[in-house]
Amino acid sequence: MLAPNSAPEPHAPDDAALRVAMQRIRVEVEKAVVGQGGIISGLLVALLARGHVLLEGVPGVAKTLLVRSFSRALGLDTKRVQFTPDLMPGDVTGSLIYDAKAGEFEFRRGPVFTNVLLADEINRTPPKTQAALLEAMEERQVSADGQTLALPDPFLVAATQNPVEHEGTYTLPEAQLDRFMMKLIVDLPDHAAELQVLRRHSDGFSPRELTELHAVTTPAELLAAQQAVSRVAVADDVLAYIVDLARATRSAPSVELGASPRASAALLAAAKAWAWLSGSVAVTPDHVQAMLTPVWRHRISLRPDAQMEGVSADTVLAAVVRQTVVPI
């Protein structure tokens, strides 16, 4: 929001116009993906909050299609990396190549130098290659040959993983998981949505080409929306509520490792983005609660005995929300 008595910049779109632009992205993506409105909202929140997203779901629920459609609607440069056991760090960040004509080595940039990086099946590559993304995701830069190279802005990593198949996979370490602002669960569509998917395929829809999708926003609008999100107000009692929630996870009986201060900061950023998308000028406890599970479900570790009893992170977080006093 603009400060009182301040004039808007010439030709700067207002918040209402920017929200309409973000809504156009949702509508465009839904031309290709049916029944995943919550996931599209999560991708938008992460983009506006300058975060990254881990999409988890069984094969065939359109995880890759979601990201490809989202980036097509944004009109941003996108690269896809298929993570495999033999993928090397340089295959992601880039590597030094000897130029025979110049007689010297030069750095050839890898696919991470893009606006939207689709890291497909990220848990199929060894930890060494997974770690190649740590600096890029956190500091939005790549260090190579004594140089620090900035990544494009905006920059979003959308990674996918299959929760069912474990053979030939490498569980993401806590440090890697912590770089993802949100973990979104891509569920199977309901009956009506699945019927609509089949109807579209029967009518000739091709998920490989996406020729019917177009860019519906501009980089300038996206940057302005990110700046608008950063200006959303947060009262001290809401900040204290986030801290209380984090501390409650650390003392929960089923939890071995609770939410960290970085997790609290991520929840705040996501809540601000969700508040702005919802048309609010300030973050409320409702916005915090709406974002808590997707932002924290991968940031807490359960005790082995709790896991054996079938306790999930989502159920623990739901209990934390019920038991924590909400500011009035």
Image (tube, rainbow, N blue to C red):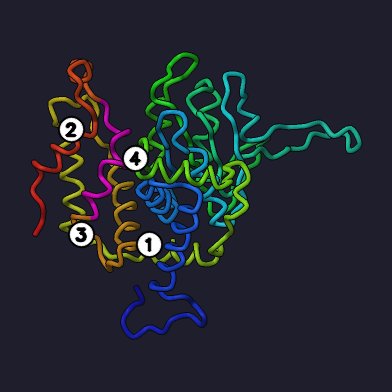
- Separation of residues labelled 1 and 4 (CA atoms): 39 Å
Dominant SS of magenta comes to helix
Mark 3 or mark 4: name the one nearer the start of the chain: 4
Mark 2: which amino acid? Val
Q: Which mark is residue 230?
A: 1
Mark 2 or mark 4: name the one nearer the start of the chain: 4
Q: Disc 4 marks which residue?
A: 191
Mark 4: which amino acid? His
Mark 2 or mark 1: name the one nearer the start of the chain: 1
Task: In this rendered view, identify the residue nearer to me: 12 or 200.
Answer: 200
Mark 1 or mark 3: name the one nearer the start of the chain: 1
Identify the element where label 4 is drawn.
helix
Single out the mark in the foreground, 2 or 4: 4
Mark 1 or mark 4: name the one nearer the start of the chain: 4
Mark 3 or mark 2: name the one nearer the start of the chain: 3
Tell me the crowding category of disc 3: few under 14, some 14 to 19, or many 20 or more residues within 10 angstroms, Cα based: many
Magenta residues? 287-301
Mark 2 near mark 4, Cβ–Cβ under 8 Å?
no
- Separation of residues labelled 3 and 2 (CA atoms): 22 Å
Q: Which mark is residue 284?
A: 3
On the image, the x and y values in percent for residue 182 come to 37, 42
Single out the mark in the foreground, 1 or 4: 4
